[in-house]
Image: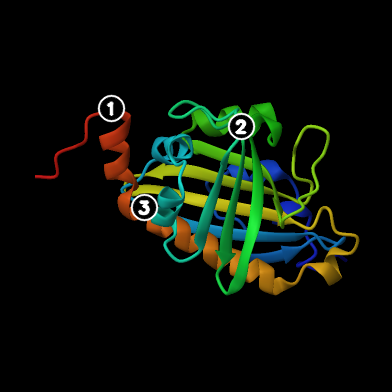
Amino acid sequence: MTHPSLLAPWGVNDINELLRPEPLRLEMGLSRSADGLLTVAVRTDLHGCKGRMLDWWFTFFETTQHINWWHPHDHVEHRGWDRHWKKGESYVGASIEAVEWLAELPPVAARLKFHAAEDFFSPQPLRQARDAQALSAAVCARIGFGDQVALDDNGNPCDGEMLHLVRDTPYGCVLRSRFLLGKACANAHDELSDDIGFNLMRHCYNEFSYLAQFLPSLYYAENGREPAPLLW
């Protein structure tokens, strides 16, 4: 009998389960697969925000000041997007480098290459989630930490993966974030401590909670395609 903590990668038996709006066994916490891969799960309620705003944010931010707005404690330096990033248009296919604290862990360099949701999920469950309005945005990436991030032949960091899945609600939206770490470790059980996971959880929850405080106003002011609702 498999121990309940030794789940498949992502903390679910099938990654497509993450597209379901119903509560999952793991919404906030850590789990390990049998081979030691560490899953970090975070749920954040973003009042006043919508998935389209979060999707737009990744086409907007491009300076250290911008990422300081996003997390005034943990975000240290924005080292830049590569040439595949198109301001105001698209971040899929682009790579980014930054330096950040992970809560109490000292600053570390991070590299991410963003992908379409279709690179992670099966076509039919993805289409069904979108049609049912259970998915309003999906920010997906391959990730790695450190000054020498191992890359595959396509420029993807080899160590981990990241998903930010957004579902719009009457009050705003709910963000289901997942990180899968340790893919490049020889022995993830020994090389990747739970402390890293817990600090990443705190970092993620805090950065998106900060973002929700200013993103709606910024979105309406900057993108020009949608009038802001009057509050009185």
In space, the residues marked 3 and 1 are separated at their CA atoms by 19 Å
Disc 3, SS? helix
Looking at the rendered structure, the kind of residue marked 3 is Ala
In space, the residues marked 3 and 2 are separated at their CA atoms by 25 Å
The front one of 97 and 171 is: 97
State the residue lying farthest toward the left: 232
Task: Say which label, 1 or 2, has the lower sequence index.
Answer: 2
Residue drawn 77% across the image and 53% down it: 148
Q: Are marks 1 and 2 in contact (CB under 8 Å)?
A: no
Q: Quadrant of residue 198?
A: bottom right
Badge 2 crowding class, 10 Å Cα cut-off, few under 14, some 14 to 19, many 20 or more, is some
Q: Which residue is mark 3?
A: 212
Q: Which residue is mark 1?
A: 224
Q: Which residue is mark 2?
A: 126
Task: Say which label, 3 or 2, has the lower sequence index.
Answer: 2
Q: Is residue 9 left or right of residue 141?
A: right
Q: Are marks 3 and 2 in contact (CB under 8 Å)?
A: no
Residue drawn 31% across the image and 51% down it: 214
The front one of 52 and 100 is: 100
- Above or below for 161 versus 201: above
